[in-house]
Image (tube, grey):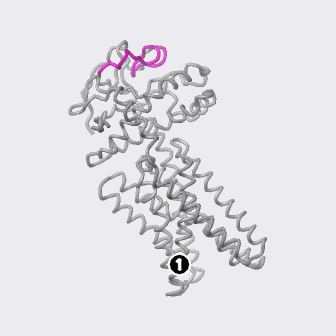
Amino acid sequence: MSYPPQGQYPDPQQPHHAGGQPMQGGQQFPGGQHPGQQMGGQPTPGGGQFPGQQMPNQQFPGQQPMPHQQFGASGARVKKNPIVGPVIGALLGVVGLILMLILIFLTDSPTYSKLVAFVVTGIVAAIGLIFYRWLDRWEPEPPFLLIIAFLWGAGVATFFGSLVNDFNAALFGDGFAAVVSAPFGEEFFKSLFLVLVLFTSTRGRRELNSLTDTLIYAGIVGLGFTFLEDIIYIIRVGQTPEELAFIVFVRIGLGAFGHSLYQSIFAVGLWAGIRRGGASAWIFGILGYLGAVALHMIHNGVSQFGIGALVIVLLLEFVIFVVGIVIAIRSSIGERKNLEMQLPSMVHFGWVTPREAGWLANMQARKQILKQAGPHEQVLKDFIQNATELAHLRTRLDQMKIPPSQGLLENHADLAALLHEQRSVVDQVLGQAQPHAVPGGWPPIQGHPGPQYPAPQIPQY
């Protein structure tokens, strides 16, 4: 990636937005500052220049300015996009879940078996959800989409997966259904959430900003599937206390998070394709799906090869599980690094102010500011969300090997628009916050100001 020619700061009394032109209405950064100054109007180390380099004062060749007055026309669209796919997914999930629960309660099994099934599977689901919410701390996903993901796994994937397995078991036997039908069918129906529900909605596609996002959605789909499937198995098999203890050990002790693990393999492949764009999204997505099927098939088929093979497969799954945890944690940490890397250019182009940059990449400062936001808490949360999403999107654009699509550029403009529209409320909250709650200026974040990215030509209606 090439960077613009180096230059000096613009006059701090004439703050600049993207394109190097003064903001409309003579707007200024708080205290008359500009992107190269710390709070109180003092220059950053190095003679008041951009951290680690000089700050450009030129427009990028071949790019059009993105004046703030353009933002109002498209900015609100990000949060108002139709979400037909997720809504249909939610309805299907609820219907499927209700049907499966009816079948469960009609099963002729002891009451204590049903109670144990719901308690132990509920505990497993709760542990998984806590972990995924912890991973999701830097750029939290919309709760309604996470709920839909769980419902899809529990209601849609479990329902249709069971139908396919029962059909194949009747034709080819239980062994074929367990080793072939279940891995291919169940992973297919689970994977449909990311492919159909999110990718059929502009809003859904825009929520997939990092590997962490795909891991979270895929993992929660797997949790939903595990929750209901384990209930079914425990209730069917656990007719006596001994049988109940055995099946709980097998389902929970040996494979509590198996379905989330399989879907994580698919998520890694899908994200690798999304980053590259074009046909790669399908190619890598299919490879990820086949990887999930392969591990699922090995897990289901190992019982036919004796205890030695079972131990080997369990060790293999444990290693893959640990590697998956490490990848997920590193990806979550990478979300903060992405934000820190992109903040210099986001301040340079006027999308965030130096004071806002001082706490956006500080989790403790975020929490303190939100506590003091009062009635504006939701606006602050939205501002944090939009700034983090913009940072992820800019990193993705920087790394792309092909020209970005119109949709990605529109998303970039929309996120910058929302930040601009929310700034007055954010600055009001920051001005009223206790001094210790806001870090004293912009920390020395190293990096180059990346490209502005051209404003897309959005039709006016």
- Tell me the residue that label 1 is attached to: 165
In which quadrant of the rendered view does residue 337 lie? top left
Magenta segment's dominant SS is loop
Tell me residue 191's x, y (percent): 46, 63
Q: Nearer the viewer, residue 128 or 54?
A: 128
- Magenta stretch bounds: 21-40
Residue drawn at x 52%, y 26% as measured from the top left: 426
Q: Please name whichever residue, 439 or 263, is drawn nearer the observer in this view of the structure.
A: 263
Q: Is residue 124 among the parts visible in the rendering? A: yes
Determine whether the residue tagged by mark 1 lies in a helix, strand or loop: helix
Label 1 crowd (10 A; few <14 / some 14-19 / many >=20): many
Q: Residue at x 56, y 66 (%)?
A: 258
Asked if residue 171 is positioned above or below residue 388 in the image, the reply reads below
Task: Using residue 108 as the reference point, say whether residue 177 is left or right of it.
Answer: left
Left or right side of 235 for 279:
left
Residue positioned most to the top: 13
Could you tell me which residue is drawn at 49 percent across and 33 percent down? 383
Give coordinates of residue 439: x percent, y percent: 54, 25
Q: Quadrant of the C terminus?
A: top left
Mark count:
1
* Residue lying furthest front: 461
Q: Is residue 269 magenta?
A: no
Q: Position of residue 3 (x, y in %)?
A: 27, 33
Q: Which residue is at 46% across, 38% downward?
A: 388
Nearer the observer, 156 or 366: 156
Looking at the rendering, in which quadrant would you find the N terminus?
top left
Is residue 59 toward the left or the right of residue 412 in the image? left
Q: Is residue 63 above or below residue 164?
A: above
Q: Check the image and report above or below for 325 versus 190.
A: above
